Image (cartoon, rainbow, N blue to C red):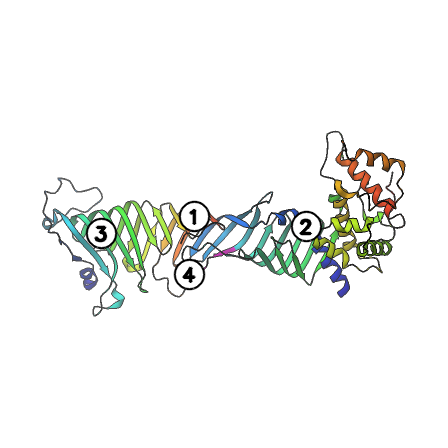
Amino acid sequence: MRKRQRFTTMALALIACAATTSAAAQAPGASRMDISANTSNIAKDKAMYFKGDVRAAIYSEGEERPTRIQADEVIVASPATEGGRPDKVELKGNVVVDSPQAKIRSKYALLNLSTNSMIFTGDVVGSTAEISQFMGDKVTYNSQTGETAIENLRATGVSFGKNTEPDDKQPGDKQPGASWLLSTDDVSDWPLFLKTLHDQGAASAPSPGKRLMSLLDPKQRQGLSSLSTGQTPPPQAQSMVIKVLNGLLKKKEFYDEASWKNVTLDGNAQKLLAKRSGDIQPAETIQLNRMLLQAAFPQSIRPPKP
Amino acid sequence: MVRGTAIAAILAALAGCGSAKVPPATPPSGTPAPAASSNFSMWGSMRLAFFDDALGTANPKPSFEVTSPQCKLLGENLWQIEDAQAKLYGRDNAEHLLHSANARFDGVSKSATLGGGVTLETGTYTIEMEEITWIDSEREARTDHPVTITGQGMTMRAEGMRLRPDPGPDPTQYIQLHKVQGSFEFSGKDES
């Protein structure tokens, strides 16, 4: 049970990595909050207490939409210094936070604007694009680093269906490249795949595994390296690995000549490879990279289904 | 009650010596008919105040005072004031400054209404509204007109406000806003 929890926590960390890497690179922080309520009291210490149908929207740079908030009571606290801007937002009772990354309900939440962290406590229930529902005693999320920590995590309904659609949808092509993206079933031998990836990544010589590891960001690399190579990871962790790999399959820089020099490629792969430096479509990039991956790990990655 | 009314009377007036003017033929609408002895206006540095009854007479301190270069006595202890500068005094010695285009000071009911556009400076907040009434017996300033509060990186609009300089055991009762909507700026340079 404890091990499962560790795996799932790691998996969620991978979710956070995958979901927030680009945003984190832009170092987002809450810049503004719009709020409305039936009443608001201002205390002498400058704290503001909003009550009754409290609705708020927090805007952060780089976010596609604001984080929407509902709670029975919202308290906005400012530092003691004169003119200091608010540094904490406290949410009490029937808290609902709907952010671009996750939707979380809890009894209490604290947004620390100095550290860009948000802590949820009290019957925390949430969902992300990948997990239909997770529960925990305490969830801490840092919007700047993308780090998520969940105490006593229980997760259900892990899904990766939404991630099989590439970003390059074109008219007349419902899911270009989608069939070339991986699912957890496409890894036929998880222990072997993870061991090969780990070994190649640790070796000094160029190899597909080393190339893949080099394309990951540090948190993704750390997450993959932390997986045991001797056993099949739990479904949640598998999904997260697949999500990370599918992210790599969309990259044009996936292929590196030195890394694949000892890998035999079939005619189709070579044709696409020749097209790579020219006018290659995003869907073709995914197709090529999937072929390159399958050729590099023939014992553990299945060929694409027709 | 007699003492309270007496205390609410004019504290000081006529520093620059007032001069009487012929009263208007008709008093301003909504005001009681002026007493015969009060049908005059004054110019000079006027200061009208209510005193905090809770402090007793040995150590009198004002709870509210208003100064003006021009005021008109409309009736018994009822003053019409132009260009009013007022102060609310908290028992913690905090001062809340108000400025308004006009005001009416009622020494009998111990209330004062500032109007014609009011600005209230309290701590780091600036509050703007059309009108506000100080009720001395309740030690509360209130308005049911829209207010705009700025300060501490915040701009907030509300449909009404209560301000208590001495909120008592519940410090959140300092300023109460009704039907509030606005925004906080979290980033950027502090205003201090």
Q: Position of residue A150 (x, y in %)?
A: 67, 60
Instruction: Please state if B177 lies on the left or on the right of A64 as rendered.
Output: left
What is the distance, in whole Å, between disc 4 and disc 1 at their CAs?
A: 17 Å
Q: Is residue A240 above or below residue B170?
A: above
For the residues bearing labels 3 and 1, Cβ distance under 8 angstroms? no
Q: Which residue is the site of mark 2?
A: A128
Q: Which residue is the site of mark 4?
A: A45
For the residues bearing labels 4 and 3, Cβ distance under 8 angstroms? no
Q: Nearer the viewer, mark 2 or mark 3?
A: 2
Q: Position of residue A109 (x, y in %)?
A: 57, 58
Residue visible at 60% across and 53% down?
Answer: A144
Q: Position of residue B137 (x, y in %)?
A: 28, 60
Q: Which mark identifies residue B156?
A: 1
Give the chain letter at badge 1: B
Quadrant where the C terminus of chain B sits is bottom left
Q: Is residue B138 above or below residue B183?
A: below
Q: Which residue is the site of mark 3?
A: B105
For the residues bearing labels 2 and 4, Cβ distance under 8 angstroms? no
Camera-nearest residue between A133 and A165:
A165
Under tag 3, what secondary structure? strand
Mark 4: amino acid: Asp
Q: Nearer the viewer, mark 3 or mark 1?
A: 1
Under tag 4, what secondary structure? loop
Mark 2: amino acid: Thr
Q: Which residues are magenta?
A: A73-81
Mark 3: amino acid: Phe
